[in-house]
Image (cartoon, rainbow, N blue to C red):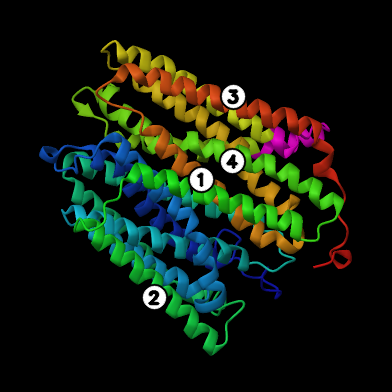
Amino acid sequence: MSSQDTTSDVGFFGHPKGLLTLFLTEMWERMSYYGMRAMLVLFMTATLQQEGLGFTVASAAAIYGLYTGSVYFLGLPGGWIADRLLGGQRAVWYGGIIIMIGHIILAIPSQFSFFVGLIFVACGTGLLKPNISAMVGQLYSDEDNRRDSGYAIYYMGINLGSVIGYMVCGYFMENIGWHWAFGAAAVGMAIGLITYRLTGRHIATVGHVPTNPMSASQSTKAWSAIALAVATVAAVTIATFTGVLIIDPVILAKYVAIAFTITFFLYYGYIYFAGNLDDNEKRRMWALFLVCVASTCFWSGFEQAGSSLNLFARDYTDRLIGSFSIPTAWFQSTNAFFIIILSPFFAALWINLAKRMVTPTYSIKCAIGLLIMASGFIVMFFASQYAAQGLKVAPMWLITTYFLHTVGELCLSPVALSAVSKLSPKRFAGQMMGVFVLTYSIGNIFSGLLAGSFDPNNIADLPNLYLQIALFTIGIGVFVGVLGLKTKHWEKQSEKPLTEQTA
């Protein structure tokens, strides 16, 4: 991170001009990502007569979970490539190009091109997303106290982009055609790339070189390994499409979920047992483990938004306002709207509670987030009962659910990230953030597997699905909360200075 004085750069609402570059680039990248993601399950489950792929809900939900889980997982090698080979600036540029190519491929009406496009978008996002976020922090010196508010502005760009994506792609999907909607996502990413290039002078010294570059020989070996990985993925894709290799996406999702879970436990255990941690650090690792459990469970429920809740909006929600039919994807935009509206209130809430000497632990805040999200599925339990009677339910059922899920997200998501930064052993901070990201991947894949049990032709099963998710989430929330009460002092253990810790 830069140590130079950056406080004199106030060209964008009192922040460095580079923040505008990253804000707009990320806004358009999120427009393309969320706009396309909102259509995935709908496109895969649409019939061939509707120009969809005609997949079963189980297969479509599993593919959706694999895709969203892979996006988070690929951020780990994406960050490594930037740190060791490309630098942040080039990683963001090439990642954006790969994303745009992926959306263009998705716009081609072919089943083969669909999967190729998904792979491109996932790989490009893994390269762009972690590095553009890191570059925001690099705009500020260590002494610059504008950093937190800078990230708040940047986060606003993420949500604005998602709203634009849902609105534009959702409208194109239902009024013009699927592939025009995928093409709109490509245009969004293209605008982001143009903006990034035209305003790139504002970030000229940020991420322009790798932070920990490899030697020439090491770099050659690394690129050879990357080329081999790309060739392997290409070969598997071609073999699958030609019928040489048969892959059941549901079975694959189960194995990938198991593999990611094992990887999480092995890496977490390695740091705990072989990281030469002192007693206080080990206690904080146990407290952080509760946060990881809560995060995994939360995202497995929250990500129903793009799968089972999306299908519920399409098939069982009364979307007519007069003669206008609300595009299905527009319902997902309510999450971004609620985040924009509610974020300042939650930031003030924790501050005011602290002033009153009421400071819930990380585990307690995460438990509250889980319980609030569970209440959203209880709402859907009642809504799906009405739908099971053959009724089209009012939009407010879904909007209420998304509101509760957003409140749960604001209780858990920023708190969990803060917990990783505070409770991780300082010398393993970067690695622990990578391990924590695995909870997003695991949660997303489990979400797809859960949504796969939703059969639109048998709506009577849906109330049980939402009730089971609600009860399981409540159980995990109570588990995390009770243990959080018993271990609350572990989060407050004073740390030894870094110089006293043995690497």
Q: Residue furthest bottom?
A: 216
- Looking at the rendering, the stretch of residues picked out in magenta corresponds to 347-364
Q: Which residue is mark 3?
A: 474
Answer above or below: position of 314 versus 204: above
Give the left or right position of residue 462, taking residue 52 as reference: right
Q: Earlier in the sequence, mark 3 or mark 4?
A: 4
Q: Position of residue 344 (x, y in %)?
A: 61, 39
Point 34% across, 59% down: residue: 119
Q: Which residue is mark 4?
A: 295
Point 68% across, 39% down: residue: 290
Answer above or below: position of 199 versus 390: below
Q: Which residue is mark 1?
A: 442
Quick check: is 461 in the magenta stretch?
A: no
For the residue labelled by badge 1, is the local secondary structure a helix, a strand or a loop? helix
Residue 428's quadrant in the figure? bottom right
How many labels were placed on the picture?
4
Give the left or right position of residue 232, taking residue 441 as reference: left
Q: Which mark is residue 227?
A: 2
Q: Amino acid at mark 4?
A: Ser
Give the left or right position of residue 116, taking residue 109 as reference: right
Q: Earlier in the sequence, mark 3 or mark 1?
A: 1
Q: Amino acid at mark 1?
A: Ile
Q: Residues within 10 Å of mark 4 (few under 14, many from 20)?
A: many
Q: Earlier in the sequence, mark 4 or mark 1?
A: 4
For the residue labelled by badge 2, is the local secondary structure a helix, a strand or a loop? helix
Q: Amino acid at mark 3?
A: Ile
Q: Which of the two discs, 3 and 1, sits closer to the camera?
A: 1
Give the left or right position of residue 273, taking residue 11 as reference: right
Determine the CA span between mark 1 and mark 2.
26 Å
Determine the CA span between mark 3 and mark 1.
19 Å
